[in-house]
Structures are given as structure tokens and as C-alpha cells.
Image: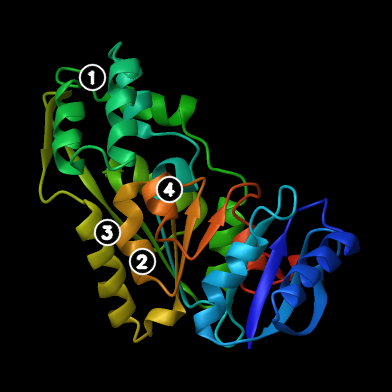
Amino acid sequence: MLIATLIAAGSLNKDSIHAAATLLEDARLRLGGWGWLDEGDAADIEVDADAGQLGRIRALLEGALPKTDVIVQHAHGREKKLLVADMDSTMIGQECIDELADYAGMKDEIAAVTDAAMRGEIDFAQALHQRVATLNGLGVGCIERCREERIRANPGARTLVQTMRARGAGTLLVTGGFHDFADPTAAELGFTEVRANYLDSMHGHLTGRVTGAIVDAAAKCEALIDLRNELGLSPAAVLAVGDGANDAPMIAEAGLGVAFRGKPKLREVADARLDFNDLTALLWGQGIRRADWVG
């Protein structure tokens, strides 16, 4: 049995659900009924089909209803036991290095490189070194200032993390950004594990270098696999969410890989896309009702 979850917080109605059901029935799919998760926000439609129909069902429903995100998956095991999330433009609304570069008067130039890297148009590690080099000489005090003045969690981020933790799931924040931003963000949102890069500094100023191994696309995926194995989980028990091309391997590796406002290369491999709703949609996708949310 498959479950198609329709999510349109504040605007989902019975007519929309019936329209979705009709699309599926017209495609000769057998339905097992539907029910609200939270009335007006999210609903489940049961589909009597196997895994081979997952992509077809999603293709039928995506774009068919206004401002509605669709998650299609197996009914069994839909609640995940490990959350792995990207940070920049996913858990938070900003790209930290772009904001930090603004204190050096280089935001526009750096943001263009960041965008190309997130689209997968240039090598991530090369782009990271290029961007960090422009920060040479910037006082380290700008990091805390940037964090306090500009970095904000995306709507639903804390509720997603706190609710999954409260229900016993592992939580990992993994980013191609920096510990200077990732560690406070993880503490604020409730992540228990963090993987990130290290900015080098000397005498109170950044040197324009990154120290240690780079957390690139491969390292993100490896971190997911390592923690999954440490917790003794199957691939199906993992939820991963990100936005850029450098998230693609970990998104493909997860049992439910989600593109949040995703770049084209990530959207191609993701199991689901969140284009309209905030991150709490991933709780509805797991069948968790608002009454059971934390944070």
C-alpha cells in the first residue's frame, strides 16, 4: 500500500482531495480511501499499488493542485528514525558565506559563485576555496555579528527537529558551510550531530583558508551512511532534506529524500519536493499530526 500525502497548509479542501482522487482513478489506480491528517492542511490518500508506481503517482499529482506539495511513499515505515538536513537555504533561510562576505564588501561576487556551486555548474570544493579566499583579513568578530544580525531559521525547522527527536529519531545537521554557524544553529534547532567545515584564523582575523577535509557532496552522503549504520537503521528509515546539487548524493541515499525549494539537479533525484509549504510538511509526510508536534 502506498500513501499520497497532499499538503497545502491552510488551503486544502475536500474538493481538492476529490480532484486528486479522480486523477488517480482515471489513471486506473485503485484507491483505498482518504483521511485528514489535519483538516484544511494535510490529507492522506491510500493507493493500492507497489513501489513501481511511486513516480507515476507523484507525476500525476504534482502541479495538479494549486500550491500543494505531494509526498508519495510506502505506508509501512513512513515515520523515519533519522533526520539528515542541510543547513544553508534549508534549515536556515540564508547562505552564510554570502552574508559574511557582505562584511568584506564582496556579497554580490560571492553569491554568484555560491549559486553556481549549488546548481552544480562548478566544482563545490573549488568554489568553496575561491569564496573563502576573499575573506582573508576579515576580523573573526564579524562571524558572531553576522550570525546575530542575519542568520534566521526557516519556518518549521525547529518544530521538525524537536518533534523527530522527541519521538526517538537521530538528527544530523550536515553542511558545506562552517562550524562557526552550524554549531549554534544545531543547538538552537535541536540537532544532536553536526558535520561542517572549519574556517582558519590567525591573530583574530580569517586567513582565507579552510582547514581539514572538505564537507562536499560525497562527505555529506558518507556522514548519512555512517550515522545510519551506527544507529542500526535501514536506508528506508532515513529522511534527508536539502536544496543544492551538493545534497544530491545524500538525498538519493535516503529512504525519503526531499528537495526544499530545490535546485534543478537536486529535484531530479529527490523523492519529494517542498515548493510551497514550510518544513513542518515533513511531519505531515510522516503521518504526524499537529497535536503531536513539539517546539
Q: Residue at x 80, y 70 (%)?
A: 22
The residue under label 2 is 252
Under tag 4, what secondary structure? loop
18 sits left or right of 213 in the view: right
Q: Residue at x 66, y 50 (%)?
A: 277
Please state which amino acid type lies under the numbered disc 2.
Answer: Ala
Q: Residue at x 21, y 18 (%)?
A: 138
Under tag 2, what secondary structure? helix
Q: Can you say which quadrant of the picture contains the N terminus?
A: bottom right
Which of discs 3 and 4 lies nearer the camera? The answer is 4
Please state which amino acid type lies under the numbered disc 3.
Answer: Lys
Under tag 1, what secondary structure? loop
The residue under label 3 is 220
Write down the quadrant of residue 38 in the picture. bottom right
Please state which amino acid type lies under the numbered disc 1.
Answer: Gly
Q: Residues within 10 Å of mark 1 (few under 14, many from 20)?
A: some
Confirm or deny contact between disc 4 and disc 1 (CB under 8 A): no
The residue under label 4 is 243
Alpha-carbon span between mark 3 and mark 1 = 29 Å
Q: Residues within 10 Å of mark 4 (few under 14, many from 20)?
A: many
Confirm or deny contact between disc 2 and disc 4 (CB under 8 A): no
Q: Which of marks 4 and 2 precedes in the sequence?
A: 4
Position above or below: 199 against 208 = below
Q: Position of residue 211 (x, y in %)?
A: 10, 42
The residue under label 1 is 139
Q: Position of residue 87 (x, y in %)?
A: 40, 47
Alpha-carbon span between mark 4 and mark 1 = 30 Å
Q: Which of marks 4 and 3 precedes in the sequence?
A: 3
Alpha-carbon span between mark 1 and mark 2 = 39 Å
Alpha-carbon span between mark 3 and mark 4 = 13 Å
Please state which amino acid type lies under the numbered disc 4.
Answer: Asp
